[in-house]
Structures are given as structure tokens and as C-alpha cells.
Amino acid sequence: MPVEQAIFTSLARDGRAGYHLVARSRGLDDADAQALTSWCPSHGALLVNPANLCSLNFHPMPRGRFAISRTREGPPEYSGRGGRQVYTHILVVTRDDLRLADWQPFSLYRDALARGILRVRLGPPAELPHVELGRSYPARGVRDPEALTQSVSIDQLAAWCDDLVNGRSVTVNYEGDRLRLFEDLVNLLPVEAVAAVSFTTSLRSSVVRPFRLGPAGA
């Protein structure tokens, strides 16, 4: 399936400096760029530990589309203020794309990761091509139910699912692999609820990034 892509990071380009949308494919217009910019993180936004070195993020977009993005640390900040660049690579998918993947944003993410689409690019061109993802994905479900229930109680999982289905936000205090935990949690939801659940595995939440599901400490 062809999908749009964009990159948000700190880069001096076309008279602009600091964090902005530095590259995008032709199917993303200015309204899309503005929406992506509001959800994308800048310096100090990552909540990383040895089990969570990057963040997978999912949120709605204009015209019924959705953004699936990976945020990680890049090279040292060019500005010289210290620390490393925060680098976010975004895929913009449609409802039909999600339906084809059995409502599994994590499966689309893994597909893009395996194809090398999400690698850090130090000097990306301002106009990116469309990217191709697969058209066949495994059925949704919990991959290892026993391991999941050893990490989190069944009662806690049920409470989180109930909150998300009923429109309440959930903050998860978990230092293990949050990507795996959140994937199982999202796959426990009814498919009609997935599109309404924005999430981040390792970003600080904010007024302009109101993720429904995220880590504690945000």
C-alpha cells in the first residue's frame, strides 16, 4: 500500500531553524503539516530507559487519516545547546490502510521498520516519495498471554481497556517494554475503539499532544 511520510526534527533549512517539519511527501498539504507539527515532540520530550529507547506514537489527522510515528534520539544538536536531536519519522495512513492491517498500527510500524523506511536521515530532501507497505498482516491478538499477565494483572488490563473504550485517558506506570505492553493492550480493544485511542509509548504528554494512552512521568 502507498502511504505518505514526513520527518520532524531540528534542522536549519530554507531560513528556518529549530524543530519543524523538515520533509514531507507530496500528498501532505499545509493543513497536514500544521497538524503534524502540533503533535510532534522537540527537545526533552522523550521518556527513555534501557527497555524503551524510542517511542511509537499514534494520533488522528485531518480528513480521517492517522499518523503513526517513531521518535528517537538522533545525532548531537546542531545548535550546540547540548543533548541529542529528537527525530520523528511519520507515516500517514488511511482508515482503509488500518482496516487492511486488521486495525494494528503496531504491525504497520514493524513493516516500515523492517523495510528500512524509519532509519534516521541526516539530510533528507525536502520532498519525500511515497513509501510502500505490505498488504497482508497477521490477525490481531495478544502474542503471549501468559507473559502479559505475568507483567500486569488481568484486573488492571480490564480496567485500562474499560477506560479507553469509554473515552477516559490512561497513564501506565511500567518500566518494561512499553511498546510490547501497549500493543497487547490496543489489540485487546474492540476494533471500533482503536481509531479513537491516540497513544505514545515514550513521549511526555502536553496540551497540544493530548494522547489518550501514555507512560507515567509524562
Image (spheres, rainbow, N blue to C red):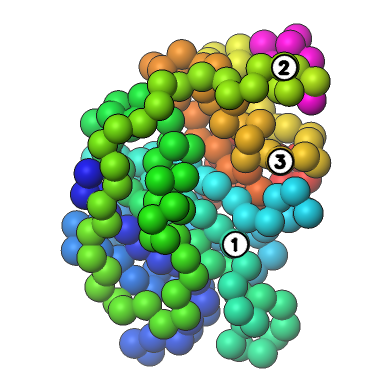
Which residue is denoted by mark 2 in the rendering?
146
Would residue 34 appear left or right of 97 to someone viewing this image?
A: right
Instruction: Tell me where residue 148 appears, x and y as whole percent.
Output: 71, 22
Q: Looking at numbered disc 2 in the image, what kind of residue is underneath it?
A: Glu
Which residue is denoted by mark 3 in the rendering?
177
Q: Looking at numbered disc 3 in the image, what kind of residue is underneath it?
A: Asp
Q: CA distance from mark 2 to mark 1?
A: 30 Å
Q: Which residues are magenta?
A: 151-158
Instruction: Tell me where residue 80 appears, x and y as whole percent.
Output: 66, 90
* Majority SS type along the magenta span: helix
Residue beneath the point at 28% across and 29% down: 100
Q: CA distance from mark 3 to mark 2?
A: 16 Å
Residue beneath the point at 74% across and 11% down: 154
Q: Residues within 10 Å of mark 1 (few under 14, many from 20)?
A: many
Q: Looking at numbered disc 1 in the image, what kind of residue is underneath it?
A: Arg
Residue beneath the point at 53% across and 67% down: 87
Identify the mark nearer the N-term, 1 or 3.
1
